[in-house]
Image (cartoon, rainbow, N blue to C red):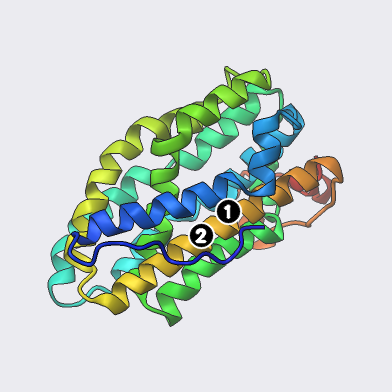
Amino acid sequence: MIHTMERPQISQTAGTFERLKEEFAAVSAEFNQSPAMKRFASGQMGVSHYKEILKQVYFYTRENPQIQALASVHFRGSDRDLVRMFFKHAVSEIGHDKMALSDLASLGEDPAPIPNGNPLPATRALTAFVFYEIQFGNPIAYLGYLYFLEFLPTGSGGIYMRMLENLGVPTAMSFLQEHVSVDVQHNKLMERYAERIIQNEADYDAVVYAMRVTGQLYADMLAAALEQADNPKSWGIAHREVSRRPDSVSEDTDATEATDH
């Protein structure tokens, strides 16, 4: 578990984006010391664990374009100047969930039933948190969620890929490879978001809080995925997903398999 951190000493004269970079350095360092990441680094996991991680990556990633679009609903005043950019960014995220399914297929896993199952509770918590902050907290906090998810692969993705290679999965990393490269451009967008949308200390504090919580919840999700691989449990069928997908599997047992392995 990631413990509550003391805020690092950060220059108040630095630009907003520079301050966030320093905050993220502390958050990512703590994330990399989480139990799941220590297990990953020590090689105490196998392909079955990576498969379960990819399933959870699929579940939260498929929500991200719509979450980003939702955040823009709350833009007011000069925030609206960035709506077009925000939408383009959201559109660029569409289909990234399919990369996780493609990686699973490369590992010999049938990805077809996965969209019809429910995510692990920890994965649901990750997406539920950002939905809640956008709708009931400060919607600007969304930038903290986005910052963590996009700067993590550009900062540490190469290390994670080498760790995966040591597990014997060098041909099933399209999702990670994409985010190591594409998110570099998205990081540049983040600088513009930070300088234009974060207008006061209340906004800044909301973004930092969301960044920290996202790091905690992401570590929790990884730990839950490892536990799911070690001790499989069914989390049932996402009936609304199934009912609104004409080509979905029809047998309950097939859909249940989505989170059973």
Marks 1 and 2: in contact by CB < 8 Å? yes
Q: Residue visible at 53% across and 68% down?
A: 129
Query: What amino acid type is highlighted by mark number 2?
Result: Thr
Q: Quadrant of residue 100?
A: top right
- Label 1, residues with CA under 10 Å away: few <14, some 14-19, many ≥20: many
The correct choice, above or below, for 80 with respect to 245 in the image is below
Q: Residue visible at 32% across and 58% down?
A: 20
Query: What amino acid type is highlighted by mark number 1?
Result: Tyr
Residue 137 spot, x, y in % from top left: 42, 80
Residue 220 spot, x, y in % from top left: 65, 55
Q: Residue visible at 68% across and 22% down?
A: 167
The answer to whether 132 appears left or right of 190 in the picture is right
The answer to whether 238 appears left or right of 77 in the picture is right
The correct choice, above or below, for 136 with respect to 79 in the image is below
Q: Please name the residue that numbered disc 2 is placed on.
A: 214
Question: Tag on residue 218?
Answer: 1
The answer to whether 253 appears left or right of 246 in the picture is right
Under circle 1, the secondary element is helix
Q: Nearer the viewer, residue 160 or 258?
A: 160
Question: Tag on residue 118?
Answer: none
Under circle 2, the secondary element is helix
Q: Residue visible at 51% across and 28% down?
A: 159
Residue 18 spot, x, y in % from top left: 25, 54
Residue 257 in sight in this render: no
The correct choice, above or below, for 241 with respect to 136 in the image is above
* Quadrant placement of the C terminus: top right
Residue 84 spot, x, y in % from top left: 19, 57
